[in-house]
Structures are given as structure tokens and as C-alpha cells.
Amino acid sequence: MTTNAVLDFDAPPVRRLRADLALALRAAAHHGLAEGVCNHFSIELPDGSERFLLNPRGLLWREIQTEDIVLVDFHGRKLAGRHEVEPTAMVIHAAVHRITGQACVLHTHMPYATALTLTQARALDPCLSQNAMRFHGRLAIDAHYNGLALDHGEGERIARAMGAADVCFLGNHGVIVGGARIDHAYDDLYYLERACMAQVIAQSTGQPLMPAADELAARVAAQTLGERLQSELFFEALRRTL
């Protein structure tokens, strides 16, 4: 989306996005999706300026507030903010925003989703649980782990593997969840981990798994995406409680 004016870092719409991004990070910490001071969430500014907000280097997700969020461009250059940025964040997020067109990009090493990237299938089965079915037709897999993403070529390779999908499982690494809005993307991230947790637990029983029919899973995905009010209510509940 383009507008006539480039938004300032401290303009009210940008401050709102900064606050929402900080909230999503604290919520992820609350839900056990964080890993040390690693991994990043980002949201593109809605002014067509090819800039995005990102969490900084060195802070735990649970401590991040509005004033801690930084601004970078699609080339991975820091433009504003009081903290530094971790190199892999700029490499991965800049490429995913630019190549896939996702406005919000959430990258984590959350435990159960990451566990599935270590399996031969590399990803969630979107026909198992109801939570998994919301991701039917929305998943991509990057099975080729190439080490830390420290150069733009690797970031672009990851982004191209994600393509038009909303979720990309990165082999031996973690996951990326994209979306048009922070609240919708965070809701997907949360339920993705819940779906992965259910699958890992089910697999640990050693009993045969019983996936639903592909057509039914596709219908559940359409039902979920047809009305996202529940996602928005969830995020506002997190705002009240966190």
C-alpha cells in the first residue's frame, strides 16, 4: 500500500505499530515461544517506504516495550531506534518482506514447531488436529539448512522457499509466520505451536495417527480464515493482561 507521505518514526500510527509489535513479543515470551535474546518479529510500515519495525538485539522478549523497537529498511540498514540490530534479523526479515510481500514476519525457534523441522517430513501435518487444519494449503518447507543466515543471498533463498505461503518450516532451524496484520499473524503463530505440540505428543505415544480427509482439512482452513474476529479478540485480551 502506498500513501502520499512517509510516516515518521514517532507518528501516532507508527507508535501504535511499535506498541503492538512489543506486545506480540511479550506475549510470545509469556507463551513459551521465545529463545534467549534470539529471533525476531517485524512489521512493515504502511506507507510504501520499504521500511519495517523490528525488535532490537540483546533484549529478552518479555522486557521489550514500545521505546525499544527499531526501524530498518529493506536493505537491512538501521534507520531509527536506541538499540542495535542483530545481523541475521536484517538478512532474513528484509528479504522476506521484500520478496514475499508479507507485512508482518514472525520468526521463532519455538520448541514443538522446531522439533518437527528435525523430522523427515520437516513440517506439521495439516490434516491431523483441528488447530493444524487452519494451516492447510498455507505451508511451505525449506528443507535445506545452510547455517546461520549472515548474508543477503541466504535471506533471499529462505524468502523464495517461503514464496506465497503464510508459514514456512525451515529444516533444522525453526519457522517463519507471515501475515497482513500483527494480531492475525500472532494468532497463527500461537496456534501453529499448539498444533505442532499436539502432533509431537501424539507421535510420542507410538500409536498410529488418524488424519482427517484432505477435503475436510481444506474446509476447516477456509472456515478459520473466513472470520478473523477471534484472532483480534485474542490479541486485545493479551493487551489487557500483559
Image: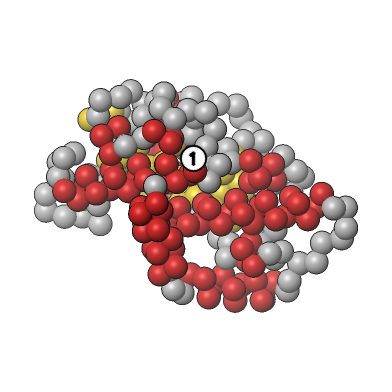
Residue at 60% over, 51% down: 193
* Residue where numbered disc 1 is placed: 29
Image quadrant where residue 229 sits: bottom left
Task: Pick the quarter of the image with the N terminus.
Answer: bottom left
Q: Position of residue 200 (x, y in %)?
A: 74, 50
Residue placed most toward the observer, 6 or 116: 116
Left or right side of 202 for 170: left
Residue at 48% over, 70% down: 225
Residue at 52% over, 37% down: 34
- Few, some or many C-alpha atoms within 10 Å of disc 1 (few <14, some 14-19, many ≥20)? some
User: Would residue 19 be seen by someone viewing this image from the given angle?
Assistant: yes
Q: Position of residue 126 (x, y in %)?
A: 66, 62
Q: Position of residue 68 (x, y in %)?
A: 30, 32
Q: Position of residue 167 (x, y in %)?
A: 54, 52
Q: How is the image coloured?
A: secondary structure
Above or below for 136 versus 78? below
Residue placed most toward the observer, 159 or 123: 123
What's the residue type where badge 1 is placed? Ala
Toward the right, the furthest residue is: 207
Residue at 69% over, 71% down: 214
Residue placed most toward the observer, 239 or 76: 239
Left or right side of 232 for 33: right
Toward the left, the furthest residue is: 5
User: Would residue 152 be seen by someone viewing this image from the given angle?
Assistant: no
Left or right side of 137 for 25: left
| Element class at badge 1 | helix
